[in-house]
Image (cartoon, rainbow, N blue to C red):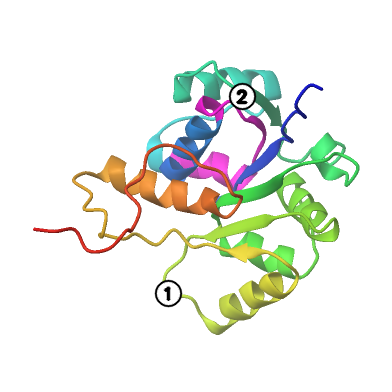
């Protein structure tokens, strides 16, 4: 009997700093042969322009070509969705997925999701993961967290989300920023049980 095809992964990119983490996440997912439903919020499009000087297309086909060029890979399957298209497949619970990761996640998006408010496709897709009991991994990118942030994140955790802030570590002895980015991205996707890229995992102190 043929093996069952793996379910798609929803990758949400919201309007917070740390967009290079999102790009590397998409690259590793596609290189691993995954099917990715990608939704980039309007805020994220603005952040790309403000921080990187790059204009992300809104049209799904143009955006697909854009991300293929940015990641430099033709592997995997990529489906891009317009940020406000709440009729997209990922807006329905009948569209089966393996889960969703929001990387990075703004505190504005956190607050709206915690309140059950979906103003765009990213927030609706996250709501779908929660109502269907599927994995939802939220990677908040803010410092410091105030009490409102903490309460919103607690509400999402109580609803079933995993909270995975991109916190760096040094036990794997990174020698450059790319290695640190990989550590952060790979650890996030550990939450979905995915093995992406190469990572020196903790196995005890490294002998001098």
Judge by depth and name the residue closer to the eye, 139 or 50: 139
Q: What residue does disc 1 label?
A: 144
**Which corner quadrant of the image does residue 78 belong to?**
top right
Q: CA distance from mark 2 to mark 1?
A: 33 Å
Label 2: state its secondary structure: helix
Q: Which is more N-terminal, label 1 or label 2?
A: 2
Residue at x-position 37% and y-position 49%: 183
Pick the quarter of the image with the N terminus.
top right
Tell me: residue 147, above or below residue 141: below
Q: Is residue 33 magenta?
A: yes
x, y percent for residue 142? 46, 65
Q: Give the answer, above or below, for where 151 lies relative to 31.
A: below
The 10 Å Cα crowd at callout 2, few under 14, some 14 to 19, many 20 or more, is: some
x 50%, y 39%: residue: 25
Counting other residues with Cα less than 10 Å from the Cα at mark 1, is it few (<14), some (14-19), or many (20 or more)? few
Report the front residue among 5 and 118.
5
Apparent side of residue 71 relative to residue 179 in the rendered image (left or right): right
| Image quadrant containing the C terminus | bottom left
Q: Residue furthest front?
A: 1
Task: State the residue position of label 2.
Answer: 63
- Looking at the rendering, the stretch of residues picked out in magenta corresponds to 30-50
Q: Residue furthest bottom?
A: 147
Q: Where in the figure is residue 67, as x and y percent of width and height? A: 54, 25
Examine the rendering and report whether any part of residue 18 can be seen.
no
Q: Residue reaching furthest left?
A: 208
């Amino acid at each position: 009997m043929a093996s069952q095809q793996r379910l798609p992964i929803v990758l949400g990119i919201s309007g917070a700093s740390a967009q290079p983490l999102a790009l590397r996440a998409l690259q590793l997912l596609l290189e691993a042969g995954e099917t990715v439903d990608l939704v980039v919020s309007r805020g994220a499009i603005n952040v790309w322009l403000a921080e990187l000087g790059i204009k992300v297309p809104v049209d799904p086909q143009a955006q697909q070509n854009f991300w293929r060029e940015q990641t430099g890979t033709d592997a995997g399957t990529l489906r891009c969705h317009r940020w406000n298209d709440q009729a997209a497949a990922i807006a329905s619970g009948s569209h089966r997925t393996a889960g969703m990761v929001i990387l990075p996640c703004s505190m504005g998006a956190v607050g709206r999701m915690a309140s059950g408010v979906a103003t765009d496709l990213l927030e609706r897709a996250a709501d779908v993961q929660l109502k269907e009991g599927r994995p939802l991994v939220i990677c908040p990118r803010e410092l410091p967290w105030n009490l409102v942030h903490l309460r919103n994140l607690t509400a999402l955790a109580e609803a079933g989300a995993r909270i995975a802030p991109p916190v760096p570590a040094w036990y794997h002895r990174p020698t450059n920023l790319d290695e640190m980015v990989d550590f952060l991205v790979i650890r996030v996707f550990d939450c979905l049980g995915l093995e992406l890229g190469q990572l020196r995992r903790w196995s005890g102190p490294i002998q001098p």
